[in-house]
Image: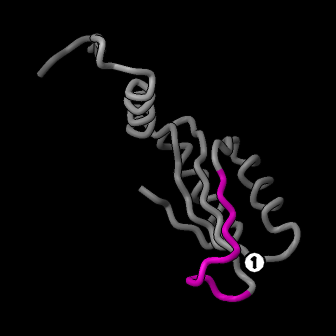
Amino acid sequence: MLTGKTVCLLSGGNIDVKTISIVVERGLLAAGRYLKLKVELDDVPGSLARLSADIAATNANISLITHDRRSKALPIGKTEVLLELETRGFEHIRETVEYLDKRGYGLEVLK
């Protein structure tokens, strides 16, 4: 077993900004710094604003949001929201999911 600090060194002419970005994003995912959620909302004015306010109350930050009202898989009167949230770690993810669940959101954590 290795002890001490471990360093990952990326070098070479074949490493571009896109590849480095993917490596960093995967590292952030592995560290619990991102949370991906699918949430089903009532398709009424204010639903998305309430969800956003509830996410803000957890101190998570929305980095990406997709709001789909036209999926054939959704019942009439419902909308699906896909979210990527920036978090502080696995404990923050657990707290965020628990908070949103207690607020009555039908949510699914995506991998």
Q: State the image coordinates of residue 32 (x, y, percent, origin top left).
A: 46, 40
Is residue 32 shown above or below 27? below
- Nearest the eye: 99 or 81: 81
Q: State the image coordinates of residue 103 (x, y, percent, origin top left).
A: 71, 67
Q: Amino acid at mark 1?
A: Asp
Residue 72 included in the magenta stretch of the image: yes
Instruction: Kindly tell me whether residue 60 is visible in this rendering.
Output: no
Instruction: Kindly tell me whether residue 85 is visible in this rendering.
Output: yes
Q: Main secondary structure of the magenta part?
A: loop
Question: Which residue: 57% across, 57% down?
Answer: 97
Query: Quadrant of the rendered structure where residue 104 is?
Result: bottom right
Question: Which residue: 53% across, 48% down?
Answer: 35
Q: State the image coordinates of residue 14 (x, y, percent, origin top left).
A: 29, 18
Find the residue positioned furthest to the right.
45
Q: State the image coordinates of residue 18 (x, y, percent, origin top left).
A: 44, 28
- Nearest the eye: 17 or 40: 17
Question: Which residue: 38% across, 38% down?
Answer: 30
Residue 58 left/right relative to 48? left
Is residue 94 shown above or below 41? above
Question: Which residue: 58% across, 68% down?
Answer: 107
- Nearest the eye: 58 or 46: 46
Local SS, label 1: strand
In this picture, which residue range is highlighted in magenta? 65-76
Residue underneath mark 1: 42
Find the residue positioned furthest to the bottom.
76
Image quadrant containing the C terminus: bottom left
- Nearest the eye: 101 or 110: 110
Image quadrant containing the N terminus: top left
| Category of crowding for the residue at label 1, using alpha-carbon neighbours closer than 10 angstroms: few (below 14), some (14–19), many (at least 20) | some
Is residue 41 shown above or below 97? below
